[in-house]
Amino acid sequence: MSDIEEKFSAYWPRSPRQTQLKPLAKRLETLRGKTIVQLWDYVFRGDEVFALLEEGLKERYPDINWISWKEFGATHGNEEHEVLASIPQRFKELGVDAAISGMGA
């Protein structure tokens, strides 16, 4: 080691994992007749993206019941905590089978 080289201690910038991984929910076998909710953070063109998704999926599954992102409010922002906390109960009330959550920049 030369006189101008120095040694520095380095630390991993992240803390140890605090939660354990959980298994993913089982995938739906089909979207036929299912109720699909849209959740959006109001950050990046979700209104356009969800309209395109509805249009494209309607061709393959004309009997999908869509619940608009407008029903829930922004999943990011001033009311984020209230919106997110309400989701499980609202999903039960509305009979939701699956959700599409987006977007973010």
Image: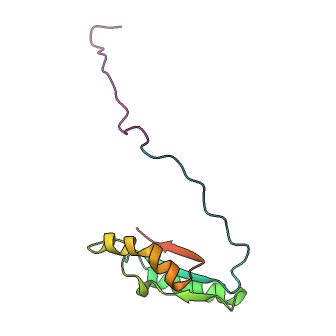
On screen, residue 100 above or below 22 = below
- Residue at the image position 68 percent from the left and 87 percent from the top: 33
Which quadrant of the structure image shows residue 53?
A: bottom right
Tell which of 8 and 33 is nearer to you. Answer: 33
The magenta stretch spans residue 71: no
Instruction: Check the image and tell me how it is coloured.
Output: rainbow
Observer-nearest of 58 and 87 = 87
Is the stretch drawn in magenta largely helix, strand or loop?
loop
1 above or below 10? above
Q: Position of residue 21 (x, y in %)?
A: 53, 49
Rendered image quadrant of residue 100: bottom right
Q: Quick check: 44 above or below 47?
A: above
- Nearest to the observer: residue 75 or residue 96: 96
Q: Is residue 15 magenta?
A: yes
Position in image of residue 93 (x %, y %): 50, 83
**Would residue 3 be visible to someone looking at this image?**
yes
Q: Residue furthest bottom?
A: 62
Residues 8 and 35: in front is 35
- Image quadrant occupied by the N terminus: top left
The answer to whether residue 63 is left or right of residue 3 is right
Residue 69: quarter of image: bottom left
The region drawn magenta spans 1-17
